[in-house]
Image (cartoon, grey):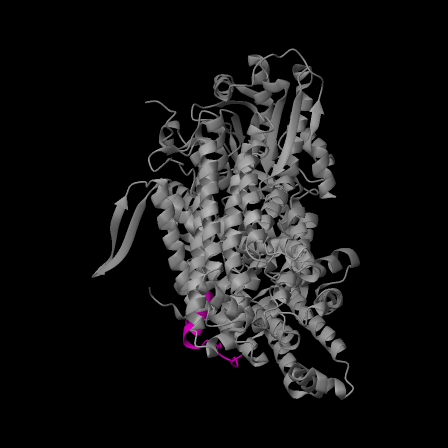
């Protein structure tokens, strides 16, 4: 195979774009896991709900993409808060696996309801007019919208990292995961903090959904398959750190992009193969603390 | 809502009992099985049940006095679920004829069961040309279209109008490979050239890197050898990357009216593909489409719906003539002997291998400004006459074809 | 990790094996009579899933390991058996300057051999996947098994011998031991029932063996088991492989029942379904998975015309099981009657 350098750069860039979705989703999972000790299987469904929320806002309220970018995460995050209060809060004292099973059930319900109501052929959602068009970078064509996706998700990821690792709020959060009783003794409402954290993680998923709406088909199953890939991303990164989730997300997007160029047949499986290799060599993941 | 609709559609009794002694258990039971809730729910789904009912309605006096029942079921595009339903339909519910069945994998499974139980299978939704090829059966008629006809129509016409270099974007599984192989053969036969292909994972989500490879190939035509959400996703992202504006054209090898509807004309414009039927071709079709849409949440009929209508019509005419529905093989034999005629497909015939033959049409999706209203999506580019539209009888390797 | 607390199951207090024996006799009697009242192909399918759920239960109920990718062994065994019975070609790639294919056999096999080899195949897959997955615990273990299963799902979509979306079909039923014509529905039913009972008894035997006692000790407290000198990883791996092999047995019978092997059985939703069956019937109960499988399969069968509602109801059952009755149907009954089931 002759290597065409410009094309290769093009693929790298595309990989970075896919990586930004992985990063946002695995970041949301990491935030939720860090605080609630729950692997949120409904994450894919919540990502899908974000995309649908964007569609509904446009269709029924006439609110465009930019509004959706703010409102959809708030709405879906709100639903997440309801879910946490109604279901998840009863599980904290049980084995972690029950959280996985419960959210799996929730994912089935949400996806089933959307399919029942909207079929699965997909709904149209256009790229916002400000971001249509393609930029000729010399080595490749980059649609403006994708450039926006990379920049914006990078900003969101870093913002989240900063908030959790560098601010006082983040310090409380981290402290509460380590020792909730002690933090409560300082007069901080830990249950509420947990609820809000779940809402925030879900909101991140919804945000990814809104960003995906203009370029991927908006349909009820859009989150079902991607979530398993994100699980593999999480295993590779190790749940230890927020930064780990971000770096692994972007990195694996790039690796996947390269696979699509050199060996397209394996592009679906490459992330899983990497997962196996990482597990054999570093069982705790690349950034993980040993549990 | 959808639940209610399925419940209403699931049993439609027509007329009272009569003196047809040979009708097994006194009822002609038509089982419409397809994807009622998934990817193909809009292009087949409950609409096919409706189409079967409309066909019965239109036969009017001819079937008066016959007890005809239409039942519907959802196979969820899974062969094991589909074959389960069909077995139970035939063994327990005494269904006489299975209709529609999109998704080739399910259709191939049903094909075997119907043959084993000697019932009748009228395929409208499935694409695999194997159904009239190596897997042909004396109990099966493939009605509306098949992969060979689509590949042939699209490949042929595009090469003839100057699209002589092709790059294939192929779904990496048996169905995608078959579509690519059939189309590439047609392209090469007509003097075109295949400059490359890329196999994308199935199901795919992001096609951008494959589209970039297609773009770099400088081929005039990018052939989409995939289906359903893969096709719509690829078209959507091709529009985003401005591929069509830069002079390359997309050719869909399996595109339906409902796909175009969900993409919107802005994204789908210029797309070329082959279909067997379009609602806006003549008055009879338009009248049918109006009636159909009124009872189907305003969604217009696809060629699969029209095929169900046509197939059920011919089947019932045959059963009336034979005064019997008990021997599936005999019914199909009789259906093959007599020419078909109905409001939507006009005159046609059924070949020895079970292939229903009629003209196919090459369509191009209109530009938004050309469209006069909702569902006005296609313009006709070429008509492929019936004798050229389908695979020659001798090439199919069907064991039923002697000599 | 948390599984050491052993909250996953709530085994009822033991009152000897009498209740189990009675329940077993009742089960055999019911299975023998049922075909007179219920459509036999449905029963055979349900029996396959019941065995599958029992195999899964061996892991989660008695070792405390949640495998979220058990469809891998079930579905691939199904492909193996279907392929061997229909085509029978086995080729092994080897290196001789370039990659060559060595074809070992090239003719369709008798059902018993096809099923045996398929079970071996599933055991090998289970061994490989198990050795990777047991490196992590708890939810990581679940995620890894899920990811591995998804990887093999994609492989099944692409591999030529699986027939992609079409699957392998039709699978001939053939003659068992050259004597019994499996095309006869009654003979087939007896065959499926016998295989189910054999698998069931094997699992029962394992659970009540010294090996099974060590597994339960690992479930209750892995650290303690380690400090007692048990190489827990080895025990876990053997249990995993065994569970995969029995799941493979269930999967290997299925293509003979439904006469096709398809992607449905390797998809992650199938892994979810088997979790649901076991959870609903009762984790860590011997009869629970059987009850759970019959309930779920019956629901799918009789509610099929309602399309997506089946999925929604399944999701609802998941939520209800986790929040309200974690012991499952059989577990609750056993607890109520203070017997072991």
Give how far across and how far down residue C291 sits, in percent.
Answer: 60, 48
**Is residue A11 located in the magenta-colored stretch of the structure?**
no
In this picture, residue A123 sits left or right of residue C108 = right
For the question of whether residue B356 can be seen, the reply is no
Q: Quadrant of residue C99?
A: bottom left
User: In this rendering, is residue A189 above or below B378?
Assistant: below
Q: Quadrant of the N terminus of chain A?
A: bottom left
User: In this rendering, is residue A219 above or below A75?
Assistant: above
Q: Quadrant of residue B205?
A: bottom right
- Residue range (magenta): A266-291
For the question of whether residue C174 can be seen, the reply is yes
Give how far across and how far down residue C255 sits, in percent.
Answer: 45, 42
Give how far across and how far down residue A86 sits, in percent.
Answer: 75, 65
Question: Image point 49% across, 74% down: which residue?
Answer: C225
Name of the residue lying farthest toward the left: C97
**Is residue A269 located in the magenta-colored stretch of the structure?**
yes
Question: Image point 48% across, 49% down: which residue?
Answer: C263
Question: Image point 46% across, 28% down: which residue?
Answer: B116
């Amino acid at each position: 195979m002759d290597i065409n350098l410009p094309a290769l750069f093009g693929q790298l860039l595309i990989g970075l774009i896919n990586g930004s979705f992985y990063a946002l989703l695995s970041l949301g999972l990491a935030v939720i896991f860090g605080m609630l000790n729950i692997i949120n299987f409904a994450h894919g469904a919540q990502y899908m709900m974000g995309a649908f929320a964007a569609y509904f806002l446009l269709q029924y309220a006439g609110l465009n993409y930019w509004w959706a970018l703010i409102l959809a995460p708030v709405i879906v995050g709100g639903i997440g808060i309801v879910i946490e209060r109604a279901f998840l809060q009863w599980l904290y004292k049980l084995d972690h696996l029950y959280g996985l099973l419960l959210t799996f059930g929730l994912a089935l319900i949400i996806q089933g309801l959307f399919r029942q109501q909207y079929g699965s052929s997909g709904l149209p959602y256009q790229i916002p007019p400000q971001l249509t068009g393609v930029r000729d970078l010399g080595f490749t064509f980059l649609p403006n919208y994708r450039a926006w996706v990379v920049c914006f998700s990078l900003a969101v990821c870093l913002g989240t990292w900063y908030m959790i690792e560098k601010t006082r709020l983040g310090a409380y959060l981290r402290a509460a995961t380590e020792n909730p009783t002690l933090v409560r003794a300082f007069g901080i409402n830990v249950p509420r903090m947990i609820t809000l954290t779940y809402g925030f993680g879900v909101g991140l998923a919804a945000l990814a959904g809104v960003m995906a709406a203009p370029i991927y088909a908006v349909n009820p199953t859009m989150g079902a398959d991607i979530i398993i890939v994100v699980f593999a991303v999480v295993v590779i990164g190790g749940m230890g750190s927020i930064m780990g989730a971000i770096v692994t997300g972007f990195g694996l997007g790039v690796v996947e992009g390269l696979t699509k160029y050199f060996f397209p047949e394996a592009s679906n499986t490459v992330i899983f193969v990497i997962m196996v290799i990482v597990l054999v060599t570093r069982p705790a993941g690349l950034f993980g603390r040993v549990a | 809502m959808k639940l209610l609709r399925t419940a209403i559609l699931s049993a439609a009794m027509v007329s009272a009992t009569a003196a047809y002694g040979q009708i097994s258990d006194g009822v002609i039971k038509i089982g419409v099985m397809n994807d009622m809730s998934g990817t193909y729910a809009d292009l087949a789904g409950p609409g096919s049940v409706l189409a079967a009912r409309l066909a019965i309605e239109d036969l009017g006096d001819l079937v008066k006095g016959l007890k005809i029942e239409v039942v519907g079921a959802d196979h969820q595009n899974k062969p094991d679920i589909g074959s389960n339903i069909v077995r139970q339909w035939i063994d327990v519910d005494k269904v006489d004829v299975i209709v529609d069945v999109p998704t080739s994998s399910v259709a191939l499974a049903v094909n075997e069961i119907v043959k084993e139980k000697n019932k009748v299978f009228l395929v409208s939704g499935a694409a695999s040309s194997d159904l009239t090829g190596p897997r042909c059966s004396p109990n099966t008629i493939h009605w509306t279209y098949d992969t060979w006809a689509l590949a042939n129509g699209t490949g042929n016409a595009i090469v003839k109008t100057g699209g002589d270099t092709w790059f294939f974007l192929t779904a990496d599984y048996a169905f995608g490979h078959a579509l690519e192989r059939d189309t590439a053969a047609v392209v090469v036969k007509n003097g075109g050239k295949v400059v490359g292909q890329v196999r994308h994972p199935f199901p795919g989500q992001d096609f951008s890197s494959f589209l970039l490879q297609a773009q770099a190939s400088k081929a005039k035509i990018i052939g989409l050898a995939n289906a359903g959400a893969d096709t719509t996703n690829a078209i959507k992202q091709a529009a985003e990357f401005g591929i069509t504006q830069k002079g390359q054209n997309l050719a869909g090898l399996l595109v339906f009216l409902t796909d175009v509807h969900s993409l919107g004309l802005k994204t789908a414009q210029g797309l070329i593909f082959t279909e067997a039927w379009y609602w806006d071709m003549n008055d009879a079709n338009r009248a049918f489409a109006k009636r159909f849409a009124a009872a189907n949440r305003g969604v217009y009929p696809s060629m699969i719906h029209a095929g169900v209508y046509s197939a059920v019509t011919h089947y019932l005419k045959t059963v009336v003539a034979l005064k019997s529905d008990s021997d599936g093989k005999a019914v199909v034999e009789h259906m093959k002997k007599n020419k078909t005629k109905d409001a939507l497909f006009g005159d046609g015939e059924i070949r020895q291998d079970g292939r229903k033959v009629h003209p196919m049409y090459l369509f191009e999706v209109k530009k938004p400004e050309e469209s006069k209203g909702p569902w006005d999506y296609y313009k006709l580019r070429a008509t492929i006459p019936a004798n050229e539209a389908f695979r020659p009888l001798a090439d199919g390797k069907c064991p039923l074809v002697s000599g | 990790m948390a599984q050491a607390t052993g909250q996953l199951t709530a085994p009822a207090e033991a009152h000897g094996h009498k209740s189990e024996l009675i329940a077993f006799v009742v089960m055999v009697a019911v299975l023998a009579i049922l075909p007179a009242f219920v459509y036999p192909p449905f029963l055979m399918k349900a029996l396959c899933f019941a065995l599958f759920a029992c195999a899964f239960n061996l892991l989660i109920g008695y070792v405390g390991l949640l495998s979220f990718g058990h469809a891998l062994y079930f579905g691939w065994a199904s492909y193996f058996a279907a392929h061997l019975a229909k085509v029978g070609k086995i080729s092994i790639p080897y290196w001789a300057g370039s990659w060559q294919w060595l074809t070992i056999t090239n003719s369709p096999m008798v059902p018993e051999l096809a099923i045996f080899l398929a079970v071996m195949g599933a055991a090998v897959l289970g061994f490989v996947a198990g050795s990777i997955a047991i490196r992590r615990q708890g939810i990581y273990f679940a995620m890894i098994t899920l990811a591995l299963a998804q990887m093999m799902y994609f492989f099944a979509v692409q591999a030529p011998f699986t027939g992609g979306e079409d699957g392998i079909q039709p699978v001939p039923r053939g003659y068992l031991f050259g004597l019994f014509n499996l095309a006869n529905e009654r003979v087939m039913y007896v065959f499926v029932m016998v295989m189910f009972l054999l698998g069931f008894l094997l699992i029962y035997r394992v659970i009540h063996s010294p090996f099974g006692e060590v597994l339960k000790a690992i479930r209750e407290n892995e650290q303690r088991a380690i400090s007692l000198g048990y190489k827990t990883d080895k025990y876990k791996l053997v249990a995993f492989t065994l569970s995969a092999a029995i799941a493979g047995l269930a999967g290997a019978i299925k293509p003979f029942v439904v006469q096709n092997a398809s992607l449905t059985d390797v998809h992650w939703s199938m892994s979810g379904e088997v979790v649901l069956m076991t959870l609903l019937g009762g984790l860590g109960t011997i009869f629970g998975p059987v009850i759970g499988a019959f309930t779920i399969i019956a629901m799918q069968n009789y509610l099929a015309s309602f399309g997506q509602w089946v999925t929604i109801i399944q999701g609802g059952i998941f939520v209800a099981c986790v929040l309200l009755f974690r012991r499952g149907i059989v577990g609750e009954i056993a607890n109520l009657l203070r017997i072991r089931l």
